[in-house]
Amino acid sequence: MKPADHLPPIHPGEILRELYLEPLEMTPYALAKQLHIPRTRIERIVAERSGITTDTALRLAKFFRTSPEFWMNLQSTYELKVDSKRLADELAAIREIEAA
């Protein structure tokens, strides 16, 4: 295992909240208004109850001048870490293909 594998998964909502909203002193409501989406979508993301969809990634990227891949990579990395822990026993039981 790599050292990063031992770190807890970081939800993209934590990144959005701590690295973007808090420094800008922006509320989820204000961000949602700028993105033209329901405030509940951003509220659920920053509360770490929902993930980032492609639609939201595109909107966040436009507003914050980042890339949609940045937001989607945060989401997929989080999901991979959560699921790899959840499926650890099942994955360990899968035999790898023999090298040719």
Image (cartoon, rainbow, N blue to C red):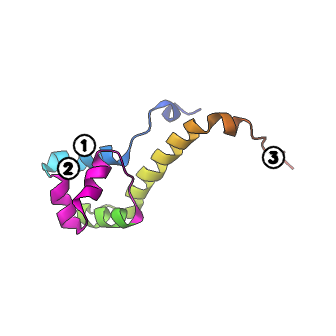
Query: Label 1 crowding class (10 Å Cα cut-off): few <14, some 14-19, many 20+?
Result: few
Residue found at the very far left of the displayed protein: 25
Instruction: Identify residue type, mark 2.
Output: Leu
- The location of residue 28, given as percent across then percent down, is 20, 53
Q: Is disc 1 placed on a helix, strand or loop?
A: helix
**Residue that carries the numbered disc 3 in the rendered image:** 97
- The location of residue 81, given as percent across then percent down, is 51, 41
Q: Is disc 2 placed on a helix, strand or loop?
A: helix
The dot on residue 21 is 2
State the CA–CA distance, disc 3 to disc 1: 43 Å
Query: Label 3 crowding class (10 Å Cα cut-off): few <14, some 14-19, many 20+?
Result: few
Side (left or right) of 94 relative to 59: right
- The location of residue 94, given as percent across then percent down, is 75, 41
Q: Which residues are magenta?
A: 27-54
84 lies above or below 7: below
State the CA–CA distance, disc 2 to disc 1: 6 Å
Instruction: Identify residue type, mark 1.
Output: Glu
Majority secondary structure in the magenta region: helix
Kindly check if marks 2 and 1 are in contact, taking CB atoms under 8 A apart as contact: yes
43 or 13, which is in the foreground? 43
The dot on residue 18 is 1
Which one is earlier in the sequence, the residue at label 3 or at label 2? 2
- The location of residue 53, given as percent across then percent down, is 40, 61
State the CA–CA distance, disc 3 to disc 2: 46 Å
Kindly check if marks 3 and 2 are in contact, taking CB atoms under 8 A apart as contact: no
Instruction: Identify residue type, mark 3.
Output: Ile
Residue found at the very far right of the displayed protein: 100
Asked if residue 53 is among those painted magenta in the image, a careful observer would answer yes
Which one is earlier in the sequence, the residue at label 3 or at label 1? 1
